[in-house]
Image: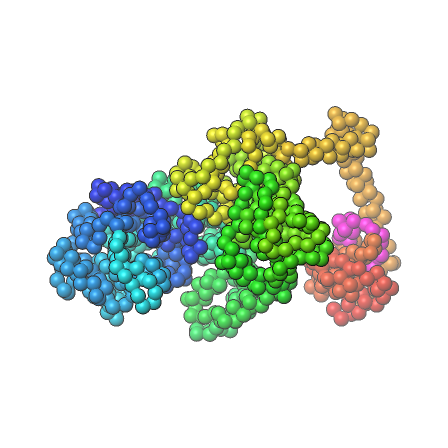
Amino acid sequence: MTKFTTEEVRSKFITYFKANNHTHVPASSLIPHNDPSLMFVNSGMVQFKNVFTGQEKRPYNKAVTSQKSLRAGGKHNDLENVGYTARHHTFFEMLGNFSFGDYFKEQAIYYAWNLLTKEFELPKDKLYATIYHTDDEAATYWKKIAGFGDDRIIKIKTNDNFWSMGDTGPCGPCSEIFYDHGEQIYGGLPGTKDEDGDRFIEIWNMVFMQYEQIDKDTSIELSQKSIDTGMGLERMTAVLQHVNNNYDIDLFQEIINFIENIVKVKVEGEAKFSYRVIADHLRASSFLIADGVIPSNEGRGYVLRRIMRRSMRHAHMLGSKEPLMYKLLPKLVDLMGNVYPELKRAESFISSILEQEEIRFKATLERGLKLLTEETETLTKGNELSGEVAFKLYDTYGFPLDLTEDILKNRDIFVDHKGFEEQMLMQKERARKSWLGSGESKTNQLWFDIKEQHGSTEFLGYTLNEAKCKIIALIKNNNLVNDIKEIDTQFLLISNQTPFYGESGGQIGDIGTIFAKDSEVEVIDTLKYLGSIIVHKCILKKGQINVGENANFSIDIRYRQNLRIHHSATHILHAVLHEVLGKHVTQKGSLVAPTYLRFDISHSKAVTNEEITLIEDKVNEIIRDNHEVTTTLMATEDAVKQGAIALFGEKYDSEVRVVKMGETSLELCGGTHVRRTGDIGCFKITSESAIAAGVRRIEAVCGEFVIKLMREKDSLLKSIENSFKTNKNELITKVNNILERNKEIEKELEKTHLASLDLSIEQIEKQAAQITGIKLLYKKVGNIDNKILRQAAENLTKKVEDLIMVYIAEGIGKLSITVAVSKAITDKYNADIIAKKLSLFLGGSGGGGQASLAQAGGNDIGKLTNIHEKLYSLLTVS
């Protein structure tokens, strides 16, 4: 049997099916496209789901893929097992061939058998097949094609060999191919009590989609039968490289050896599990970040954070004191970047996110581990860590629950899941309190009822600024009403059609006016519910408005034009950011308002002043070029093929609006835009900041608001010139001179204060009080800087070996406490403790410092009259 590399296995699989007239379809993103039922792509068929259900047509009916996939939980995929078993992974590649109404069972079995035994040269006597127990047709084909007897065809009665997409929809029996690693490995055939052993390993699964499940009890034969297959690349490579553990294949071994060269710990004993965890999680983390996922505390970002922090903890176990993950990335890119170019494109971004997250977690990891050690000191095998402690580790130290479990695994200590969930619910309840009684759920049901009765609102605003529309519903205080009579009443209005744009895709809603008979309504905002109901937020200004009547709807044209300007500028900015910062930039959120725009992007470091200038120049150049802005309706698939960018948070139908601005920008967008880029006028970035790890926020203004901004800055500059009695050409020099002079004055003042506070040894001896064999010197001073008080106190305690020096500085409504203790007596008197107790006595919350020097604050000035008594009591107790 020939030994193949991982790359050769992948290539041979794809080449084989391409030679058999299958279209090679590139891997999709790990983030499912418009599929809310999945957090991540976990198999090869996900990108073809709509093809299998008949909702989508492709220009081919046979396909082959190598699909990057991710599983971080669920049956047989618990994260805690990854690295400890032979075949558990978070990230893996699924090879697959698919037929959409072309070939079926016989040809699928032939393709699999021929590839395995002829192309990959697997011994026939090492292979077994499973079938669903009623699928006699598949059994017949296995006997015909492979020459199997009944002893090599295993009938399975459980749903493990019957696949369905859900409660309804396409479904059908499965047939799996198993490889026998040999009797030296523990395990039994599928269906036996020892089937979970590692001897017999599933290497290929074929799903025969031949039925449609109508309801729980009814299924019918499909007129178009399909094939969905999957072969795990890592498993197949292990077989072809004659190893029994996926982590022993060349791809993983190269990564593991690379790690070993850095951490200098042998890959043996318990350490080998840590190596495997890091190698697996490096792949998962890097590919997720490349596909736009950023570590966070919710959703996909939290899954990524869990994976990364588990890996970082294992790096810590190997003795790595510095961030490690980002140092491994070049090796991964070298191994997989040619097949998955997104890794190469986003390498610098992935590297910075990995490094930042590891730095952030290392700051709390050791403290969290210390707490966990303390809390489990008295626990023995089989005991349980309280849910309260597990939640504290999660909430305070950033330990995902499964990380805590992973740490305790080797000691056979469990975690109180129920207690943890109770703590989590209590926290959520505290966060939700402000929403209690809002009636939100009742209102949500209203939208479903309105949509069911009236359907979607037709939006007319792409071409019209005003239109006659029929009022179909009025809502006041979360209830449907027939009319609104009270002047200045706030309510919601829904019509059959409208020129008002409902807030979506980052663009806020229109404002304007509605006139009906003798009534007038002010529209103060426009929203969108359930994706297609446009809701006008209104105030009655005159008369009475009624359900069923027709009215004239008129938007505020100037307001809309400013929205158009800022929305079109957002598209141009997005395109320019790709050019200036790199292709890794993805949109993480946006706001298009009439006075400014806000754009959140994935980028790991601050945008420099030079980059901001370049971005502004390029955006303004595109504006000056006055490109035509065109909007075209087309199929989503065609739009993506043309290179259109899908914006963050948008849900796209089968037909989409594609907005094009010259050759600069092409995006899917349902918002409103200018006719030509020149209509924007000009563009100016007003701020750039970080809003989360790996996410930057850019704010900018356009058109008249740039002019307004420039006038404000010009006015401010003139005010500063007048204040400094100079002109703008000399202003910087004058300001620098003043700053330098201020520094000199501050130094002189500091010397003066220090001199005024300094005492000779004789003065200290004379002024200090004698308490329990030591000297106490307390002085109340004015509003002197803490730094000076600290220096003065230290100077005095260096002169006398048994001195406790206390300064209390009184500022406006606050007190500052400085305590210094001669080092010779710190074993008995602790400055930090004294300062904290004084702070609490004076209405503060405690301070901080060291045994010889500490500072704190207070605000109860009235208690200063009793400060001597407090100091005496503190020191006599000490």
Question: Between residues 160 and 761, which one lies in front from this camera angle?
Answer: 160
* Residue at x-position 71% and y-position 57%: 486
Does the magenta portion include 442?
A: no
Q: Is residue 464 above or below residue 237?
A: above
Q: Quadrant of residue 71?
A: bottom left
Q: Nearer the viewer, residue 290 or 104?
A: 104
Span of residues in magenta: 777-795
Which of the 4 quarters of the picture holds residue 770?
bottom right
In the image: residue 647, left or right of residue 130: right
**Image quadrant where one finds the C terminus:** bottom right
The residue furthest front is: 517
Visible residue check, residue 712: yes
The residue depicted at 85 percent of the width and 52 percent of the height is: 782
Percent position of residue 571, x then y: 53, 37
Horizontally, residue 855 falls left or right of residue 170, namely right
Q: Position of residue 356 (x, y in %)?
A: 52, 48
Q: Residue at x 54, y 52 (%)?
A: 533
Instruction: Please state the horizontal and vertical placement of residue 525, each as a whole percent of the image.
Output: 63, 49
Q: In this rendering, is residue 196 above or below 104?
A: below
Task: Using the rendered image of the protein, determine whether residue 280 is visible from the camera's viewpoint.
Answer: no
Q: Residue 209, image x and y in percent?
A: 27, 56
User: In the visual, does 341 lie left or right of 475?
Assistant: left
Disc tally is: 0
Q: Residue at x 79, y 41 (%)?
A: 746
**Residue 784 in magenta stretch:** yes
Display coloring: rainbow
